[in-house]
């Protein structure tokens, strides 16, 4: 399995970035965090600074499995304004590569790049107008082929598990969820957790 990459810009949404990194590692998916700034230190929307694994300009992206964009503001805008990343996302999408985005990122990044046209999508409420041509769904997580999109921080775990589901199948995603005690029993559906 090739590496997957989580892109971090100043202003990223803390829980979305950390959750997907954690869940992919639990599933055994090789993942690296990539700072799009000139520093390994990236500061979240809530003032938490974390150290990325690598800097974009020093990283080779040969045949990545997943390109992953957390949301947060101005993090999503900073991702969109970084031309090397938007070019990589376009090329990866054209090749049928897997892309995951959550919160503002599906709209601010993928929507404005035209990558959601004709596709099912979700995003943080209020950003839908940037998803021109997308079939918007009011759901926590929407999967459409090579895309896995989430609508916001509270659903970061479900979004990350959906990435695992697409990458490695239902059995692996359910095992990761059960090991984290998301489901009280292996056969219980998520709909009944808050019921």
Image (spheres, rainbow, N blue to C red):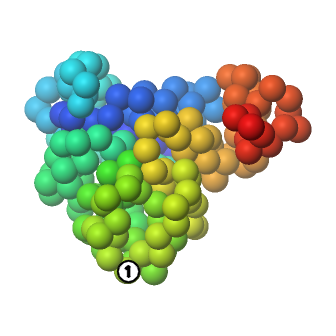
Instruction: Label 1: state its secondary structure.
Output: loop
Q: x%, y% of residue 34?
A: 29, 35
Between 141 and 89, the one nearer to me in the picture: 141
Is residue 1 visible in the rendered image? The answer is no
Identify the residue at the far front of this view.
Answer: 195
Quarter the C terminus occupies: top right
**Which residue shows up at 34% across the image and 70% down it?**
131
Residue farthest left in this picture:
38
Image side of residue 102 versus residue 180, left or right: left
**Residue 27 left/right relative to 90:** right
- Taking the image as shown, residue 170 lies to the left or right of residue 58, namely right
Q: From the image, which quarter does the N terminus lie in?
A: top right
Image point 61% across, 26% down: which residue? 26
The quarter holding residue 88 reads bottom left
Displayed quadrant of residue 48: top left
Is residue 79 among the parts visible in the rendering?
yes
Horizontal and vertical percent for residue 133?
A: 37, 80
Establish if 108 lies above or below 116: above
Residue 149 in the image: state x and y as whole percent. Answer: 48, 55
Residue under pointer 1? 133
Rendering coords of residue 60 (x, y %): 30, 44
**Total count of labels:** 1
Mark 1 residue crowding within 10 angstroms, few (<14) / some (14–19) / many (20+) = some
The residue that appears at 74% across and 44% down in the rendered structure is: 191
Kindly identify the residue that appears in the image at 76 percent across and 30 percent down. Answer: 183
In which quarter of the view is residue 7 placed?
top left
């Amino acid at each position: 399995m090739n590496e997957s990459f989580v892109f971090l810009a100043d202003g990223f949404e803390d829980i979305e970035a950390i959750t997907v990194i954690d869940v992919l590692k639990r599933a055994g998916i090789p993942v690296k965090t990539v700072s799009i700034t000139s520093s390994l230190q990236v500061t979240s929307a809530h003032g938490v600074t974390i150290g990325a694994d690598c800097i974009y300009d020093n990283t080779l992206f040969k045949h990545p499995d997943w390109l992953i964009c957390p949301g947060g503001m101005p993090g999503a805008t900073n991702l969109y304004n970084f031309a090397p990343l938007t070019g990589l996302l376009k090329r990866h999408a054209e090749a049928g590569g897997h892309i995951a985005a959550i919160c503002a990122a599906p709209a601010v990044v993928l929507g404005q790049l035209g990558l959601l046209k004709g596709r099912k999508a979700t995003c943080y409420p209020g950003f839908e107008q940037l998803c021109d041509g997308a079939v918007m769904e009011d759901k926590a997580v929407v999967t459409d082929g090579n895309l896995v999109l989430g609508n916001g921080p509270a659903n970061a775990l479900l979004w990350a598990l959906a990435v695992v589901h697409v990458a490695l199948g239902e059995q692996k995603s359910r095992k990761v969820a059960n090991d984290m005690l998301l489901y009280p029993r292996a056969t219980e559906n998520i709909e009944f957790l808050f019921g």
